Amino acid sequence: MKFCLCLSPIHRFPRIDDVLRVARQAEEAGFWSIQVPEHLMVRRQDLGPLHPLMPDPLVLGTAIAMATKRAKVFFNVIVLPYHHPIKLAKALATLDQVSNGRVIAGLGVGWLQNEFEALGANFHRRGAYTHEGIQVMQALWTQEFATFKGRFTQFEDMAFEPKPVQKPHIPIWVGGGVRRSLERAAELGDGWHPLSRPWPQLEAETAEVKRLLKQGGRRVEDFTFSYTADYGGRDELIKAYAHRSGASDPIILRDDAEQASDQIAALERLGFSHLMVRTPAENAGELLRTIDRFHERVMRPLAG
């Protein structure tokens, strides 16, 4: 199992230096990747569950890549309808070059309608726009002279550089758990990263993604299953924190090495190879201590 450190909610770090300190310590502790979220603005009546302090993901992801040496930068998730896919493809390919191939493009359709309205983006066509946007980015990243004729984007015989370091292109992990997200992940994605859900639902959806992959002639072995688990603090605090972020029934990793090992083994049996660790730590200092505890009580015993 490869572990990703969840930075969300990122308002816990009012100073970017704190984010970078956390990222460096997570890398030193053996975390495979660092998560970078995206939101833009928050209506006054939505303050509480949401927070307005949310740095631009591409700028923050670049800063994290420069502050670390090995850890992947996992965008979870970039809301693709907030971006033009050509511009986003350019930014991510450039960052993949800058980081020497350490970008994971977690992409989703978004859910906060007022953000769409503020941007002038069409909330009701966000699924179709995301689906086509992924195809646009893949074409630009893989074709020497790219051509694409779609509903929202068209171009012909276009040179596009730089190409990503990673081949054939930057891995795209589709976020979300609605039916269309499962289909999109199996058709276009290199991985799937759902939000927390009850275990029976996770089993059923994972089996369905595998079925869709095989139906489409794709190898399950070439596809990444990634999940989020909560860790640190009392169960009632973790559940309250997870529910505020949209999770329905979070998996809570235990401090006990044997129990945590059993939980992780169960996820591995389902096919999950990546686990994002989310914690209700309230500030950078508390999160740094949680990273150390997770390393000592979970990661080190598993490695041993």
Image: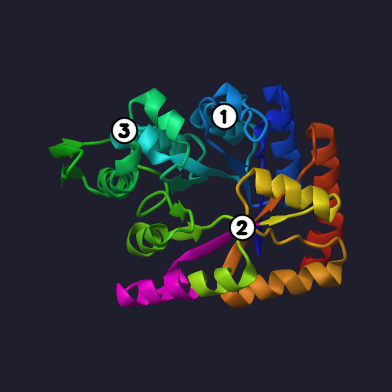
Point out the tag, 3 or 2, that comes first from the N-terminus. 3
Which residue is at the front of the view, 215 or 141? Answer: 215
Q: CA distance from mark 1 to mark 2?
A: 25 Å
Q: Is residue 225 magenta?
A: yes
Which residue is at the front of the view, 1 or 272? Answer: 272
**Side of 61 where 131 appears, left or right:** left
Which residue is at the front of the view, 234 or 161? Answer: 234
**Side of 234 where 190 appears, left or right:** left
**Image position of 41 with respect to 105: above or below:** above
Write down the quadrant of residue 304 in the picture. bottom right
Give the image location of residue 106, x and y in percent.
Answer: 48, 48
Give the image location of residue 293, x and y in percent.
Answer: 86, 51
Residue 151 in sight here: yes
Write down the quadrant of residue 283 in the picture. top right
Q: Is residue 115 magenta?
A: no
Crowding near pointer 1: few (<14 within 10 Å), some, many (20+)?
A: some
Crowding near pointer 2: few (<14 within 10 Å), some, many (20+)?
A: many
Q: Which mark is residue 60?
A: 1
Residue stretch rendered in magenta on the structure:
207-228
Q: Which mark is residue 196?
A: 2
Which kind of residue does numbered mark 3 sit on? Answer: His
Which kind of residue does numbered mark 1 sit on? Answer: Leu
- Mark 1 secondary-structure assignment: helix
- Mark 2 secondary-structure assignment: loop
Q: Which mark is residue 84?
A: 3
Kindly identify the residue that appears in the image at 26 percent across and 44 percent down.
136
Task: Mark 1 vs mark 2: give the one in front.
Answer: 2
- Mark 3 secondary-structure assignment: loop
Task: Mark 1 vs mark 3: give the one in front.
Answer: 3
Give the image location of residue 274, x and y in percent.
Answer: 60, 60
